[in-house]
Image: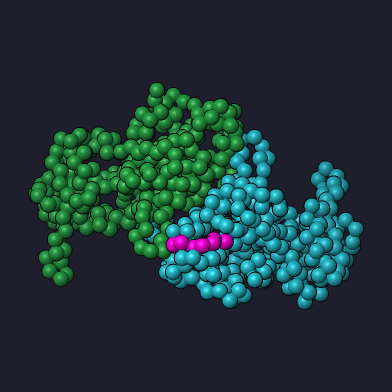
Chain colours: A cyan, B green
């Protein structure tokens, strides 16, 4: 068994290598002066099971994955598993309007062509797995995120909306605290109140947990409201921290006390390693 | 028949629309704040022949192409033609060393999945067409480039090396001038002379023609040598102007009098439209 980490996921590949006691394949990879990607696998991987780890975001990392898959195939790998810590385009999982592509399906299909198995993490919606024409599995980052939160004296885990309640419930069971979801109520034409459906945040340490934080807009509003209602510390927790544009600034300005994400997308806020959620798929 | 231009090739799509007297499909396209691509085809293209025009360079334009292809497919297009003015990764057309992918083949394969026909321009090597698992054709930009050069009082067309001689010959026949190729001769340990194999450039207007200019390094050396040997004006001509890094500066510093490329990749040097080479494929 060999592990190959693409540019976007060298960190996760290294961690999996340690956890699975399987070597990282020696590779050369670079971008040409015109920015095209070059990769070469130096080890003899013929007849081997190769695990390729690559987040498919942004777009150039997806093309990189296709090329690494082909390199492994051309080198005679017996089995190719693809680990996608963050699967991009997951939110484009249906035709919301006529004339749109089903982007998640397109990319799942293309990745499947040279993969015997695909593993991804918190894929926004589970039905995305059906888009892969090869065996596809997902794992949840919640246990690892909850483990990290255990030391933070959290009183209450909140989902940003009702649809995400299950994630908050799961985390609360590990942390052993209350859970709830944020509910929007229209007060008048210009005012929308956002607060926990049932619980009172006053003097509590609160964590809001979501799968993806992109621009952080909704999250920032929730933080503001919780602080307004007297919450002590507010933690923002997610699996995939995209933090697009000035998301971090927005969250901080809203009064967020700590931003926590996993390393499916590497950033300064990757406080939790995702590899322990993935490695069980490959343990004998 | 409808024509859809991707972000990289709106120009070529518009030109084809005029030449073929076929409408550009109305589309909405944008990048989300996290930089993922969104496209929606607004016209009813069901049962129609759709021509999608998109240069597959850099990588994000390739992903964009996949998504537009899927949007056309999902919208019920009867036939999908893909026009790729510049097909990226064309120079990675074989395993030069063990452990490498055949990048051009990977991308050709993926594009073929949702295409009934593929047209590309000067694909570096013709065997690349075999990588497409659908009908694939190429056209040459040389006639259009030569037409442009006709007004420039060119005395001599040069290929940058022997392998590219055919292109120079073809251009010379249209312009009605001499042709030759640049030959490298090692003079001593530290000196390599580059000059036309047979012809003398002294007091001549010379054009060097190649398919791709990337960093412009070799081209700059050739220009310098030609100027040293007394060439009057030196024109640099290519189909695909990548102009990576400081290529333009290098060419100018070497004494180049004009840089000319087509608009397969749009730049300030796109002096020649590529559409007249492509449109005959779609004319009844």
Q: Is residue B50 visible?
A: yes
| Residue in the image at 35% along x and 38% along y | B138
Which quadrant of the figure contains the N terminus of chain A? bottom right
- Position of B37 with respect to B144 (left or right) is right
Picture coordinates of residue A260, whole percent (x, y): 70, 68
| Residue in the image at 37% along x and 58% along y | B95
Q: Is residue A251 visible?
A: no
Picture coordinates of residue A65, whole percent (x, y): 51, 58
Whether the magenta-drawn stretch holds residue A195 is answered as no
Against A246, residue B114 (above or below) is: above
- Position of A235 with respect to B258 (left or right) is right
| Residue in the image at 48% along x and 38% along y | B115
Picture coordinates of residue B156, whole percent (x, y): 15, 43
Against A146, residue B277 (above or below) is: above
In the image, which residues are magenta? A75-81
Say which quarter of the image contains residue A22: bottom right
Say which quarter of the image contains residue A11: bottom right
Say which quarter of the image contains residue B279: top left
């Amino acid at each position: 068994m060999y592990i190959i980490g693409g540019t976007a996921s060298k960190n996760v590949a290294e961690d999996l290598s340690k956890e699975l006691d399987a070597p990282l394949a020696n590779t050369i990879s670079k971008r040409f002066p015109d920015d095209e990607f070059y990769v070469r696998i130096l080890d003899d991987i013929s007849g081997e099971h190769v695990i390729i780890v690559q987040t498919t975001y942004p777009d150039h990392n997806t093309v990189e994955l296709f090329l690494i898959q082909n390199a492994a195939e051309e080198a005679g790998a017996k089995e190719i598993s693809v680990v996608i810590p963050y699967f991009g385009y997951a939110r484009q999982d249906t035709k919301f309007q006529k004339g749109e592509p089903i982007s998640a399906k397109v990319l799942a299909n293309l990745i499947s062509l040279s993969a015997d198995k695909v593993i991804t993490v918190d894929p926004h919606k589970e039905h995305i797995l059906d888009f892969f024409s090869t065996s596809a599995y997902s794992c949840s980052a919640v246990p690892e995120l909850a483990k990290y939160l255990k030391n933070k004296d959290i009183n209450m885990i909140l989902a940003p909306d009702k649809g995400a309640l299950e994630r908050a419930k799961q985390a609360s069971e590990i942390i052993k605290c209350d859970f709830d979801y944020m509910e929007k109520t229209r007060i008048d034409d210009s005012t929308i109140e956002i607060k926990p459906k049932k619980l009172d945040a006053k003097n509590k340490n609160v964590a809001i947990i979501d799968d993806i934080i992109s621009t952080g807009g909704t999250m920032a509003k929730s933080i503001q409201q919780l602080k307004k209602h007297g919450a002590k510390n507010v933690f923002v927790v997610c699996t995939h921290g995209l933090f697009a544009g000035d998301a971090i600034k927005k969250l901080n300005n809203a009064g967020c006390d700590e931003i926590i994400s996993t390393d499916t997308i590497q950033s300064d806020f990757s406080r939790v390693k995702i590899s322990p959620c993935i490695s069980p798929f490959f343990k004998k």
